[in-house]
Image: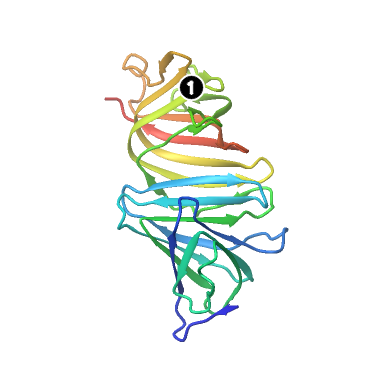
């Protein structure tokens, strides 16, 4: 179908999930496509939880889930796409498009072509919004623009097959102090736990993906008041003491290189850049 409106405005699709597994999927037929489209902006209220998940079947895809701070929060995402695409609704009610029929079915697939002079569609949800997008099969895919995305918490853990919370660290990594080259790096080994807390003015600078590894790379920056690693029962405080910085510039930059699982079938590489303020 071709979605149209009479006023040359963005098409609006309102989503309502019927079960926790409800999801909207967006894909194209061509496996070698360089870019599916542009997802910008994604809007969520302060305090919302954003979850990113990578899957490899039936095609490489990223799932983005927005969970509002309260059930009445309005969440939205705008997709700009010029080529024909498939819209798959699983346990999701879709409103706002008269042509979307057969809403009583659990799963429906629609083939959509947006108008060339207005190739935009707005997805909205109340309380939560969950959708999956096909990932281009190229060496590196950049998901978001370079505009900083503010965050208040980071979690480097995952659930194992039994539902237990375990470390997401997949390979060895290190914490270094670029402003203090004479201070030895802090190394950690998988599956050590990495903890960052008391984040201030913390933001995501960039998110990219290597589809071959099914992993995500993050660049983040900001101020953290708590930095620890945990190996078995042993905790290690990775902050520099006042003695360490006595003859140094009090402004400390920490570089944390870490490779973690982002999903049971995929790997993510996190690179965290942050400014640290000593209490």
Query: Which residue reaches farthest left?
Result: 279
Q: Is residue 263 left or right of residue 235?
A: right
Q: Is residue 43 left or right of residue 31?
A: left
**Residue, x 53% and y 78% (percent of image)?**
99
Q: Decide which of 266, 96 is in the foreground and name it.
A: 96
Q: Is residue 171 visible?
A: yes
Q: Decide which of 91, 170 is in the foreground and name it.
A: 91
Where is 6 relative to 108, above or below?
below
Q: Is residue 88 visible?
A: no
- The x, y position of residue 101, in whole percent, is 53, 75
- The x, y position of residue 46, in whole percent, is 31, 50
Q: Decide which of 31, 185 is in the foreground and name it.
A: 31
**Residue, x 69% and y 61% (percent of image)?**
33
**Residue, x 53% and y 36% (percent of image)?**
270
**Residue, x 41% and y 49% (percent of image)?**
149
* Residue 197 lies in quadrant: top left
* Residue 114 lies in quadrant: bottom right
For mark 1, what is the residue? 181
Q: Residues within 10 Å of mark 1 (few under 14, many from 20)?
A: few
Where is 164 relative to 94, above or below?
above
- The x, y position of residue 203, in whole percent, is 40, 44
> In which quadrant is the N terminus drawn?
bottom right
Where is 99 relative to 180, above or below?
below
């Amino acid at each position: 179908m071709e979605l149209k409106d009479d006023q040359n405005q963005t098409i609006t699709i309102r989503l309502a999930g019927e079960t926790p597994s409800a999801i909207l999927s967006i894909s194209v037929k061509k496996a070698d496509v360089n870019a599916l489209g542009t997802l910008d902006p994604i809007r969520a209220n302060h305090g919302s939880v954003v979850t990113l998940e990578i899957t490899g079947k039936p095609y490489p895809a990223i799932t983005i889930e927005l969970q509002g701070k309260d059930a009445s929060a309005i969440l939205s995402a705008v997709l700009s796409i010029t080529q024909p695409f498939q819209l798959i609704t699983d346990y999701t009610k879709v409103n706002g498009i008269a042509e979307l029929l057969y809403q009583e079915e659990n799963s429906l697939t629609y083939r959509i072509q947006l108008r060339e002079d207005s190739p935009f569609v707005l997805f909205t949800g109340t309380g939560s919004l969950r959708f999956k997008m096909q990932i281009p099969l190229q060496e590196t895919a950049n998901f978001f623009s370079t505009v900083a995305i503010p965050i208040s918490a980071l979690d480097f853990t995952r659930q194992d097959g039994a539902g237990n919370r375990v470390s997401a660290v997949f390979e060895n990594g290190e914490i270094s102090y670029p402003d203090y080259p004479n201070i030895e790096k802090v190394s950690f080994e998988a599956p050590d736990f990495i903890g960052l807390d008391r984040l201030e003015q913390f933001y995501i600078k960039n998110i990219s993906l290597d589809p071959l590894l099914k992993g995500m790379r993050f660049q983040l920056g900001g101020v953290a008041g708590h930095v620890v690693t945990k190996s078995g029962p042993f905790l290690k405080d990775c902050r520099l003491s006042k003695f360490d910085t006595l003859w140094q510039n009090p402004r400390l930059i920490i570089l944390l290189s870490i490779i973690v699982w982002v999903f049971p079938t995929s790997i993510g590489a996190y690179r965290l850049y942050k400014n640290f303020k000593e209490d």
